[in-house]
Amino acid sequence: MDLYQAPRGTNDILPEDQSYWRYIEAKAAQIAMLYGYRRIDIPTFEDTRLFTRVGEGTDVVQKEMYSFDDRGGNSLTLRPEGTVSVCRAYLEHGLQNQPQPVKLFYFITTFRYDRPQAGRYREFHQFGCEAIGDMDPALDTEIIDLLWQFYCSLGIGQLHLKINSIGCQNCRPAYLVKLKEYYTDCLSDVCADCKIRLETNTLRLLDCKNERCRLIAVGAPKSYEQLCPECTVHFEQLKKYLTLLGLPYETDHCLVRGLDYYTRTVFEIQPELEGAQSTLVGGGRYDGLIEELGGKPTPGIGFGAGIERIILNLKRQGLPIPPIPNPLLFVAFLGDEAKEAAIKLSADLRKQEISLVMAPGNKSLKAQLRQANTLGVRYAAILGDEEIKTGTVQLRDMQTSLQENLPQGQLLEKLRKF
Ligand code: HAM
């Protein structure tokens, strides 16, 4: 019989890799809290209309969603991202009545029916932050700084921070007209997808990955040169504050992002090695999203950072990760009576928070100690007939192979020292 395999584009995270995940999540939570963000958890699936309402013109919503009808006939969708759900929760739970901005962070699994390759999966994980309820470009700066410090704290270097402003509902329409004119003039030179984009999602013409289209995009009108006075001030202040903090940004007029809800500031961080699926994090302002979801006009800004891509970079750069500690002790035994004593001793020590593994089955002492070695424990406690009789235990230091006979009552004290 053929063995089952995990679905295409999904991954098992084996114990050997858990140290990366736990380390990154701990760092992320620590830095988010340092900047005043509080954790939120959101459901894995939502009413499909929540996503279609705000992302109708995007690939993520049109082509990549895992949607299904439940047994009650409701259309549900495995979340393709976190921002919309967080905004839904903000409105549903009246968070607009708390002091603004409400700053939230999350760790989520995310689902997109995409073409899998290294760094691009159908189920992937994001660390995200959302700050809802304030317009100040200082908040844009703060969230970018948070990200920069996060990657620095992991040791990931040689990063490129790209920013752009794609304007607001007042200035973007005029910009789109200009962009359309530019692309209409060179329509015969762009790829087939871009010919469609010209009608469906003009802004996305700018981030086509086709080599020829990229060259054409370089000469396209720049959104940040067509902003209304309010957006201009916002963008100038952002750049001023980023400079103040010494954050080395590049302005990139081709950075437009793949989701529809963005306004004004958009940003991405990429590692030195370029490529479509190398972007470590993307984010930006979404000042119209809460209103689109039925709330009163409320600005917001956030980011989603792909965790798999962080791990790829940590591994590529050979950066050290603190290992998850192995159990301290292995409890070995010889004979039935010693087995009962080992079961009891193991239970007692665990109650005292000594992490341990008890030898399973009835293997030879040699096989048990071999297993202790493989597990990387520091000590093995060995119980046999003699130890039962004398109320003692043999404690073997697995690093030095030195062994001492101890009264069982002293074992805990000895182990506590480690
Ligand atoms: P996004 O750019 O679609 O934005 O995704 C954010 C990050 O998720 C990417 O930069 C990348 O690291 C990771 N990512 C995206 N697709 C995949 C994939 N198929 N496989 C592995 N990793 C992937 C958002 O999701 C927005 N919600 C971000 C945001 C939050 N904007 C404002 N607030």
Image (cartoon, grey):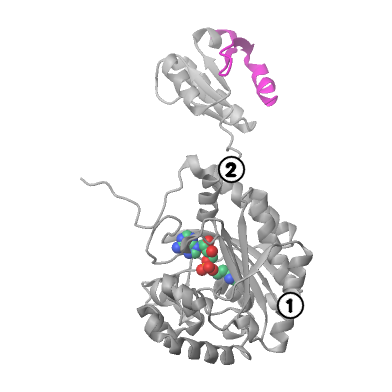
Give the camera-side residue of 71 and 323.
Answer: 323
| Secondary element at tag 1 | helix
Give the camera-side residue of 211 and 362.
Answer: 211
- State yes or no: residue 405 in magenta: yes
Query: Residue 254 vs residue 299: left or right?
Result: left
The numbered disc on residue 413 is none
**Is label 1 in contact with label 2 (beta carbons under 8 Å)?**
no
Q: Relative to 273, does residue 235 appear above or below in the rendering?
A: below
Provide the residue designation for mark 1.
Answer: 236
Q: In the image as oriented, which residue stretches furthest toward the left?
A: 1
How many residues crowd around disc 2 within 10 Å: few (fewer than 14), some, or many (20 or more)? few
**Which span of residues is magenta-colored?**
389-418
Give the number of callouts. Answer: 2
Q: Quadrant of residue 89?
A: bottom right
Query: Residue 95 vs residue 339: left or right?
Result: right
Give the camera-side residue of 27 and 249.
Answer: 249
Provide the residue designation for mark 2.
Answer: 319
How many residues crowd around disc 1 within 10 Å: few (fewer than 14), some, or many (20 or more)? some
Residue sitting at x 56%, y 32%: 326
Q: Does residue 110 show up?
A: no
Look at discs 1 and 2 and give the one toward the viewer.
1
Q: Does residue 118 show up?
A: yes
- State yes or no: residue 99 in magenta: no
Disc 1 marks which amino acid? Glu
Query: Residue 149 vs residue 185: left or right?
Result: right
